[in-house]
């Protein structure tokens, strides 16, 4: 499989066993072929080298929080493999701006200059999208291509093999994954999506950052440093 080395080299070595259970399945092989064929017709974001970037920061057992998005940003230069995050220097997309407003209110920090959330990933926060690629200027374009099966399997793998993870599910597509998570072993935080269309229906004021830390401390675990550089 031509794509195998390209993908396996993106992830922390401890994710290799999980990746090997998926990468040889028909759905995944078909997904890779479809993506390869599609990129000749339209740009795909993020670039292939960042599709599994969220799995590069830490091993599965160090996962403390999962923040689940829908699919990557579809504007040039925005997506870099971490849900809701943009590289330093990029303008804040509307959903990210609302997340950072809530973060500022919840943590007491001033609004940051950058929307790069990599420092959260370095703390054990898995910034995962349900679909890990998207067609340029076409949101949800790859949502039913096979990535959903991959991320379902990933969430189930984490939920079954680990304990006391905080799963933050914003919006109905993310909340559809709730059925994969044993509620007696993990904390599930649900709120409307941070999009301007729904943020005022309960996302603002939901305090996900302090609530996640409160749960972790109740389990005797270290809280997340939610600081942003």
Image (cartoon, rainbow, N blue to C red):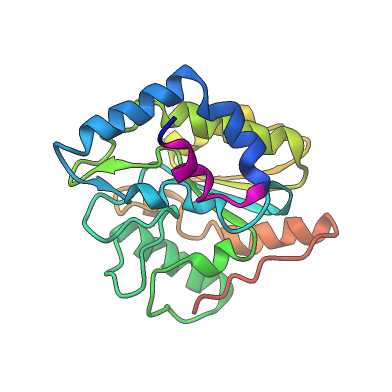
The spot of residue 47 in percent (x, y) is 32, 50
State the residue lying farthest toward the left: 41
Left-right relation of 211 to 171: right
Q: What span is in magenta?
A: 3-13
Identity of the residue drawn at 37% across and 27% down: 31
The spot of residue 160 in percent (x, y) is 73, 32
Q: Quadrant of residue 89?
A: bottom left
Left-right relation of 76 to 97: left
Identity of the residue drawn at 66% across and 58% down: 211
Identity of the residue drawn at 63% across and 43% down: 15
The spot of residue 102 in percent (x, y) is 47, 65
- Residue 85 within the segment the image draws in magenta: no
- Residue 10 within the segment the image draws in magenta: yes
Q: Which residue is more in the foreground, 72 or 2?
A: 2
Residue 47 in view, yes or no:
yes
The spot of residue 68 in percent (x, y) is 50, 45
């Amino acid at each position: 499989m031509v794509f195998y080395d390209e993908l396996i080299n993106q992830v922390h070595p401890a994710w290799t066993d999980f990746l090997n259970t998926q990468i040889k399945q028909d759905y995944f092989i078909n997904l890779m072929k479809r993506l390869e064929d599609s990129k000749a017709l339209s740009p795909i974001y993020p670039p292939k080298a960042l599709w599994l970037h969220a799995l590069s920061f830490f091993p599965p057992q160090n996962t403390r929080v999962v923040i689940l998005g829908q699919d990557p940003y579809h504007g040039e230069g925005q997506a870099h493999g971490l849900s809701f995050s943009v590289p330093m220097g990029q303008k804040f997309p509307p959903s990210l701006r609302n997340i950072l407003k809530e973060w500022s209110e919840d943590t007491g920090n001033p609004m940051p200059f950058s929307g790069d959330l990599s420092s959260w990933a370095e703390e054990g926060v898995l910034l995962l999208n349900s679909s890990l690629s998207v067609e340029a200027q076409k949101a949800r374009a790859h949502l039913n291509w096979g990535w959903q099966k991959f991320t379902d399997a990933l969430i189930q793998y984490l939920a079954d093999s680990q304990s006391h993870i905080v799963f933050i599910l914003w919006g109905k597509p993310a909340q559809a994954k709730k059925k994969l998570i044993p509620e007696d072993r993990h904390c599930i935080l649900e709120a409307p999506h941070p999009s301007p269309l729904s943020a005022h229906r309960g996302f603002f004021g939901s305090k996900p950052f302090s609530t996640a830390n409160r749960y972790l401390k109740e389990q005797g675990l270290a809280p997340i440093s939610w600081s942003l550089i």
